[in-house]
Image (tube, rainbow, N blue to C red):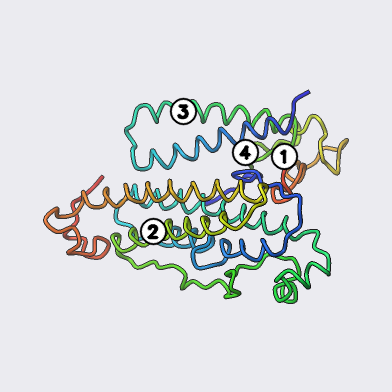
Amino acid sequence: MIDQKNLLSQITEISFTVNDLNLYLDTHPLDENALNAFKDAMTQRKQLLQTYADNFEPLTMNCICPDSNNKTKSQTKYPDQRHFTWSDGPLPWEGGAF
Amino acid sequence: MWTYEKRLQFPVNIKNTCPKTASLIISQFGGPDGELAASMRYLSQRYSMPCKEVGGLLTDIGTEELGHLEMICSIIYQLTKNLTIEQAKTAGFDAYYIDHTTALWPMAAGGVPFNACEFQSKGDAITDLVEDLAAEQKARTTYDNLIRIIAEPDVREPLKFLRAREVVHFQRFGEALENIKTTLNPKNYYYYNPEFDKQFVKKEM
């Protein structure tokens, strides 16, 4: 059983790394260490977002798939119907899955 | 083009209702140095920025500010979503409650509605970047003021995160200003408007 809160924490952390490196690379586009760190962090972020969408709701438009999302049927109005999964899961301003 | 990511940049989970705190933090939504002004400032300035990399930085920081706007609104929403009528009457939230109930509406802590005059988009790269540097410091000072008087850890943690981001953005804008200067005459960086007097700006890729 995947711990949703823990997975979302990992996504928050790695996405912060991506975001901060993005701004740094905007002003240091040739920094080799930062380029490598960005590449690694982005790879991890994509994998984590995909794992999250497979088990729970999709967090980005690119992760929406009615056939593979939310295998745990978490927080959905349509647990046994093929449906648009973008509305599954908690709203971020309600605290999200934390 | 933008797409939405269905999560906050940093978690906001507030247990206790406190309209007084909400009425102070609302300044970082629609106040003079708030996140709405920040995002609109950078996203407005970027079009005429003469240096492509600086236009890119303004886009990325302006986008992050939209995420900060969402965090601030989430804090205010969670501080007031279980508001009782007694709390609405007593905690300095009464006037806001009359006009907006517990909805989000951008204004300053002092009650002044959000106004585009909170920011500038001047069409001069030096002028605009110096404004951006000052804006980040003004926002940091506002977060300092909030953190000094708010004791609740649930509220302080996201505010501390947002304060730290102001410091990073200040750093990046400082670097962007240096970048712009490399395209100008080093004998007097401030003699021309690099966005308008294009004949004096060195060509970049």
The vertical placement of B60 against B129, above or below, is above
- How many angstroms separate mark 1 from mark 4 (CA)? 22 Å
Give the chain letter at badge 3: A
Do the residues bearing badges 4 and 2 touch, measured as CB atoms within 8 Å?
Answer: no
Q: Chain of mark 1?
A: A
**Hey, what amino acid is under mark 3?**
Lys
Q: Is residue B69 above or below residue B102?
A: above
Residue B132 numbered mark, or none = 2
Read off the residue under disc 4.
A62
Say whether mark 2 and mark 4 are on the same chain: no
Identify residue type, mark 4.
Asn
The percent position of residue A13, horizontal first and vertical second, equals 58, 34
Residue placed under numbered mark 3 in the picture: A39
Q: Residue at x 49, y 58 (%)?
A: B39
Chain bearing tag 4 is A
The amino acid pointed to by label 2 is Asp
